[in-house]
Image: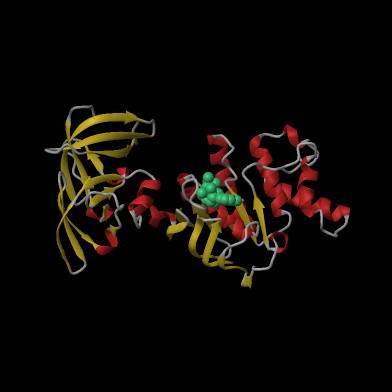
Amino acid sequence: MIECNEIQKYYGDYHALRGIDLVIREGEFFSLLGPSGCGKTTLLRTIAGFEGISSGAVLIDGKHMENVPANSRPTNMVFQSYAIFPHLTVAQNVAFGLRRDPRGKSEKAALVEEALAMVGLRGYGGRAAHALSGGQRQRVALARALILKPKVLLLDEPLSALDRKMREQMQVELIKLQRQVGITFVLVTHDQEEALVMSDRIAVMFDGEIAQLDEPETLYARPKDRRVADFIGVMNFLPAQITREADGIVSVDVPGLGPVELPESQVSRANPDDSGPVLGFRPETMTLLTPGQSSQHARETDVVIDEVVYYGDMTYYDLRLEDTQHTVRISMRNVFGRDVQSVGTKARVAWSPGSLVLFR
Ligand code: ATP
């Protein structure tokens, strides 16, 4: 549906997009994720046609967009600031999307009703826009964008002005809405959780480049480099020493964990400023064993509990790997209520080499 070929974008001397190659599939919920200033909004605006490119090409639905102005592209954009008119009614705001449409009044009114129903605002047409909540305003903005039946909906941080509860609710509603209308959604967000929850695929951007483009599960479990691993979720890092490399297997020695053998598929790039290779793993991939409990995991390691942080559904444990000064954080789901082990006690964790990533 969208193809970006070798896109370069300069603002004066500033190189904002550095060779973006990207294919977004029809009907996909796609996210551009990255820290502030990485160029994700610039990329979205070049797709929308609000921003020209220095070189490269954007194709939408197979057509070159070089000389196609924003209002002639099969895209529509929803902005972070809802940009709805407070002095108009909800229906007038939504109908604004149809201002250049030649259809008659009653036909337009039916389309407005249909769009409002789509975003869960059936019957709200007569209300004053200024009297709506933040979440409702965002829905009005969505209805206004959808009424034009674009092939692609571009969303620039559409939920960032909402409080946490509302944001989580709207995330789920947006996913449902996207499935229902079946059009391609491209979301810009700096919120990794939001991207993981909503997207079919995510492009993680740093410094005007795509660092990794994958499905959420792959990004989380197999980050291609340490920047991606640091940006998405929590990851523990331990210094590692490479002892052998042969036949696609890297053998490492990790203080506290011992020797581990990893296939190339579990090897990623370290940061340039890392002092050596590091081994990474997510908090939930280690299990704290209760005394006498055995596990199905391949390996077990002795630890001392340094800190216990109770979160209701989860408990986080900071553990010191025995005979080292290294601490790691693991998370355990509290299945039978509060069942935490106490600070200062010795314990064992179980883990599998399959959930480790070596950054070198
Ligand atoms: P944020 O989440 O903060 O909006 P972003 O990843 O969306 O960040 P962009 O808005 O795409 O980042 O900006 C990328 C870089 O290009 C930034 O360093 C920004 O200062 C710069 N930039 C953006 N627009 C312009 C402009 N019109 N003129 C000059 N520089 C710009």
Answer with the quarter of the image where residue 48 lies.
Answer: bottom right
Can the viewer see residue 182? no
- The residue positioned 77% from the left and 44% from the top of the image is 93
Q: Position of residue 199 (x, y in %)?
A: 50, 54
Q: Position of residue 305 (x, y in %)?
A: 21, 32
Of 202 and 346, nearer the camera is 202
- The residue positioned 18% from the left and 69% from the top of the image is 247
Answer with the quarter of the image where residue 83 lies.
Answer: top right
- The residue positioned 48% from the left and 64% from the top of the image is 19
- Residue 189 higher or lower than 75, as above or below: above
The image's colour scheme reads: secondary structure
- State which quarter of the image contains the C terminus: bottom left
- State which quarter of the image contains the N terminus: bottom right
Answer with the quarter of the image where residue 309 lies.
Answer: top left
Can the viewer see residue 260? yes
Residue at the far front in the pictured view: 13
Q: Position of residue 192 (x, y in %)?
A: 45, 46
Of 288 and 292, nearer the camera is 288
- Residue 124 higher or lower than 22, as above or below: above
Q: Position of residue 224 (x, y in %)?
A: 35, 58
How many numbered circles does the render carry? 0
Residue at the far left in the pictured view: 323
Left or right of 130: which side holds 55? left
- The residue positioned 70% from the left and 62% from the top of the image is 69
